Amino acid sequence: PVRSITVSGMAERSVAPDEAHIDVTLEATNLKLADAKAAHDAKLKKLFAIAEKNGIPQKNLSTQSSSVQPSYSYSDNKRIFNGYRVQT
């Protein structure tokens, strides 16, 4: 006689997502660097408050990069200073 074991089955599993990645860019520009930085920081603080209000603690938030750079435009072959841009 031939001996055999046959096994079959099916399974499903549903779980709630526990992680999300969201990319957000914050930017502020002002003639004075300190004012551009303050405006940017206020936006960042507001974003963190919105996240926390929605159950995401600040310890779970991170930034990948931040930059500060002068902003210029050009007119009649002349460079015109527009202020400082702070970006995260």
Image (cartoon, helix red, strand yellow):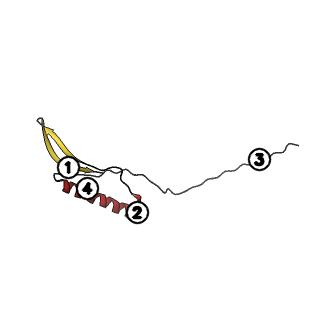
Name the residue located 56 percent from the left edge and 55 percent from the top edge. 14
The amino acid marked with disc number 2 is Pro
Name the residue located 64 percent from the left edge and 52 percent from the top edge. 11
Q: CA distance from mark 2 to mark 3?
A: 50 Å
Determine contact: label 2, label 3, CB under 8 Å. no
Determine contact: label 2, label 4, CB under 8 Å. no
Q: CA distance from mark 1 to mark 4?
A: 11 Å
Residue beneath label 3, please? 6
Whole-percent x and y of residue 73?
17, 41
The amino acid marked with disc number 3 is Thr
The image's mark for residue 57 is 2
- Dividing the picture into quadrants, the one containing residue 35 is bottom left
The amino acid marked with disc number 4 is His
Which of discs 2 and 3 lies nearer the camera? The answer is: 2
Q: Quadrant where the N terminus lies?
A: top right
**Label 1: how many Cα within 10 Å (few below 14, some 14–19, many 20+):** many
**Label 2: how many Cα within 10 Å (few below 14, some 14–19, many 20+):** few
- Dividing the picture into quadrants, the one containing residue 37 is bottom left
Q: CA distance from mark 2 to mark 4?
A: 20 Å
Name the residue located 23 percent from the left edge and 58 percent from the top edge. 38
Sequence-first tag of 1 and 4:
4
Residue beneath label 1, please? 84
Residue beneath label 4, please? 40
Left or right, residue 26 beside residue 17: left
Sequence-first tag of 1 and 3:
3
Whole-percent x and y of residue 39?
23, 57
Determine contact: label 1, label 4, CB under 8 Å. no
Give the residue furthest to the top. 77
Q: Is residue 34 above or below residue 70?
A: below
Sequence-first tag of 2 and 3:
3
